[in-house]
Structure formats: C-alpha cells, structure tokens
Image (cartoon, coloured by chain):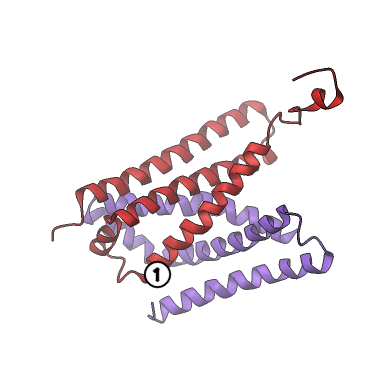
Amino acid sequence: MAISILHRVTGDGMAIVGAASVVWWLVAAASGKEAYDSFLGHATSWYGYVVMIGLTWAFFQHLFSGLRHLVLDVGAGYELKTNKSWSLLIPVAAIAVTAMIWFSILAGKI
Amino acid sequence: MGNGTNIGRVRGLGSAKSGTHHWLLQRFTAAGNILLVLWMIISILRMPGLDYESVRTWLSAPLVAVPMMLMLISVFWHLRLGLQVMIEDYVHEDGLKFGVFVLLNFYAIGGAALGIFAIAKIAFTGAPAA
C-alpha cells in the first residue's frame, strides 16, 4: 500500500512542481540571459537543490513503481512473495539511484 | 448497442461509460515518459554546463528540440490523466469538480504550449552569437 501511496504522491508532486519547473527553465532560456540567470539563482540556492534532489527521487520512485504497475498489468508478479520483494526493493533502488546521481554531481564528477 | 442479448445491454455501460481509453493512454504516455525523461536526465548530466550559452546551444539542435517537445507532450498528457484521477478521488462536489477540471486543462495545455514555444523560439533563433 505504501508503494501505491508513494506512486500517487510522487506523481502528483512531479506533475505540479516538476513540470512547472522544467517549463520555467525553458521559458527562462528563451527569454534572455537575465531571465535565465534569475532562474539559475533560484535553482542553485539551497531550496533549489532541495527541490531538484526531491524531484530526482520522486522520478525514480515513480518510474520504478510505474514499471511494477506495467508488470502487474500483464498479470505477472501477483504471487505474495514476488509482490512483496518488489515493493520492498523499489524504495531502496529509488534512494540508491538518487544518492548515486547527487553524490556524483556534488563531488564534481559529472 | 443492442438490447436483445445480455452482452448487448452491458456493452459500453461501465460506471463511467468509458475508461479503457484513459487507462491505455496513461500507459502509452508512460512509455513515452520512460524513454524521453530518462533521455533528458542523461543529456542534462552529460552537458558541459548548465549556463545560458550551453543550454541554448543544446536546445537549438534539431535532435534535441524535437525530443524535448515530444517529452513535454508526453509528460503533460500523462500528468493531465494522473491529476484527473486524483481529482476524481478527492473532489466529490460536481460544481467544484468542473472548476478544477477547467483549471487542470488550462495547466496541462497551457504548460505544454508554453514549453514547446520556448523550445521552438530557441531552435529557430539559434544559439546566442556572443
């Protein structure tokens, strides 16, 4: 159940914060250097990083539980053990990928 | 729809009269999102920098501008369907629900249009000269 709730929360969160942020980024780039620098100022502030790290986690959480949905859609993975192991693995994998990406960025390797 | 047989009477008469279409579109756009958003994330991570010049140069390439536009269509379509389900689950008053759906459509279509226009403007006017 937690995975289902997280799927909705991350989906709705990205729908509002994520999509609007990407459009803001694109419109800022199309509007000129001043607008873009103002966007970058927000994006690279502490709350900008909080939002970007949060969106990264939300994306992978939603992606992995979404893939699980697609598997369940074809009628596979309903055995109790299988079903449980996938639900336990998904949040761990999402946090691991998010951590990997952001440690690489903050360590300057990307 | 016939009324002669049992199947004829129930065909197309689920609780909402439709739904398979919404369900399928949610999956088609999900497939688009997997491909296009992953591509965007990897591309952003591989870019030399996220400053004004780098981003405009990147967005002005046809093989970036077009997938980015498709990404916006896929994402905004998918979120339009997803937020609809959330609204249907939590907003029960008909008048309010109508109003929220109007806002949702404004957001989904307006957001996608704005983003696509921004990409088109950059792609057609090119990377900054200086």
Q: Is residue B130 left or right of residue A21?
A: left
Q: Residue B122: x, y in percent? A: 25, 50
Q: Residue A85: x, y in percent? A: 75, 70
Seen from the viewer's position, the closer of residues B101 and B55 is B55
- Regarding residue A45, the answer to whether it shows in the image is no
Which residue is rendered at x = 37% and y = 46% of the image? B115
- Regarding residue A50, the answer to whether it shows in the image is yes
Using the image, name the chain to which the residue with label 1 belongs: B
* Quadrant position of the C terminus of chain B in the picture: bottom left
Residue at image mark 1 = B45
Q: Is residue B123 left or right of residue A61?
A: left
SS of the residue under disc 1: helix
Q: Residue B33: x, y in percent? A: 51, 54
Q: Relative to B74, does residue B100 appear above or below in the rendering?
A: above
Which residue is rendered at x = 53% and y = 71% of the image? A98
Chain with colour red in the figure: B
Chain with colour purple in the figure: A
Which residue is rendered at x = 68% and y = 36% of the image? B19
User: What amino acid type is highlighted by mark number 1?
Assistant: Leu
